[in-house]
Amino acid sequence: MSGSIKLKLKIITIIFFSAMGGMLYGYDIGVINSAFLFIKDDIPMSAFETSLLGGSVLFGGAFAILVAGIVADIIGRRNTLKLSGLVFIISVWMIYESSSYEFLLTSRLVQGISVGFITVTVPLYLTETVPSNIRGVAVTCFQLFLTAGILISNYVGLLFESTRDWKAMFLTSLIPALIFFFGCFFILKSPRWLILKNKDSEAKTVLQNFFSKSEVESQVKQVKDTLKDSGQSLLHIFTNKHYVVPTVIVISVAILNQLTGINSILQYSSSLLKEAGLGGNYVSIVGGITITAINFLTTLLAVFIAEKIERKFIVTFGTFMVAITLILTGIALVALPQSSIKGWVLLIGLICFVFFFAIGSGSYVWVILSELLPNNIRSKALGLALFLNSMASAVLASVFLPITVSLGDSSMFFICGAFTLLFGFIVLKFVPKTTGRSLEDIEKEFMK
């Protein structure tokens, strides 16, 4: 087998098995939507308990995200991925054995912890491990697998509609979970983490998979130069002028990416379409599946153009188009009476929304969050940014329907549109160009 084929196989192995964590994340988001329709057959729940069960994964994930960077620094990126896969498998077994609301709630919290670790560690691992010329493709695959997980889980929900077997819906997630867990035994360790732990010899062995011997020495030196002040606390990050700028940018991007409303709109899309007058349950569910399918296919397109178009441009373009789509959809909802026409207009608006989101920040936000942070603070600062990302998602999801009921179905589209406009201006003004650049080169730009 030639060297180039071996290299490609190693890269494919790294990307496929680590990005499979994204499928678990997406499955986790999507499967609960259909399961909610049938859980109440076995476990009676009040409206508050239903909302709490839905948000439990986000709160469990937020806790895990807060400590994931620290854990990844201590035991390594690869071992953290193995741990998250094992926790997910345990959570599926717990859900399957649930016969009370309290145990089911605990099971979903445990599943959220797994997803939280995945959210931080997969983009971190891919950013630090693959060569810079394919970094965009690699990290975008995490989002691709995430959207695939949402799509597949929605389809699984439709398949089990007649049997109403919600436990079987969750049980199907064991397939990607087992692939992810065992696959993590076949991926390389992060060379930057190895250097951080003074395991230079092992790091060089990993880097030799991608670079010549002379290039390996240069790579190790570059990484070491950026790790001289490693182990900084979060307090030090915000008092060091070289760290505070990229950290604040990353936190802003992480929060505003959720305030576009993407998770809430995907979670409530079928309900929104039904309320707008598109049709009954089946038509609305199919409409929701259509939206998630567009999300997946557009993300697939984003993978192919990840290294061909400057990421800053495509994220800026996509974000402004999302803002325009949200505002126009809001105007249409105000102007049109409840009817099938209004339902179809909303469906078109939501399809445009997920298309522009997926082609822009949806696909590349994980790349941006990881690329902009300096090597020696990346895990801690990324953990903080994604914790705030998860909390923003949880808060928005908890107020989305109440605000819609109180102020009208167009209100959240205008609110999210305003946040998205701010998001676009921040990317345009403060995010540097990163496509094809090494992490160390990007870091030097913030050191000026």
Image (cartoon, grey):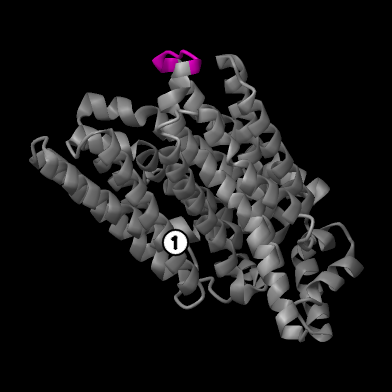
Residue under the image location 66 percent in, 43 percent down = 117
Residue 407 image-quadrant placement: top left
Identify the secondary structure beneath mark 1. Answer: helix
Foreground: 26 or 209?
26
Q: Quadrant of the N terminus?
A: bottom right
Tally of numbered discs: 1
Q: Is 43 included in the stretch rendered in magenta?
A: yes
Q: With 442 as the anchor, is 355 left or right in this view?
A: left
Residue 223 image-quadrant placement: bottom right
Q: With 122 as the anchor, is 203 left or right in this view?
A: right
**Label 1, residues with CA under 10 Å away: few <14, some 14-19, many ≥20:** many
Residue 189 coordinates in the image, percent (x, y): 79, 61
In the rendered image, is residue 360 in sight?
no
Above or below for 127 versus 284: below
Residue 250 coordinates in the image, percent (x, y): 53, 53
Q: Is 166 included in the stretch rendered in magenta?
A: no
Foreground: 47 or 335?
47
Above or below for 428 versus 214: above
Residue 103 coordinates in the image, percent (x, y): 62, 18
What is the residue that sits farthest to the front in this orientation? Answer: 163
Residue under the image location 58 percent in, 62 percent down = 139
User: Residue at label 1?
Assistant: 299
User: Which stretch appears magenta?
Assistant: 42-48
Residue 260 coordinates in the image, percent (x, y): 37, 46
Residue 202 image-quadrant placement: bottom right
Residue under the image location 69 percent in, 53 percent down = 377
Residue under the image location 43 percent in, 45 percent down = 155
Q: With 120 as the anchor, is 267 left or right in this view?
A: left
In the rendered image, is residue 82 in sight?
yes
Q: Quadrant of the C terminus?
A: bottom right
Q: With 376 as the anchor, is 388 left or right in this view?
A: left
Q: Amino acid at mark 1?
A: Thr
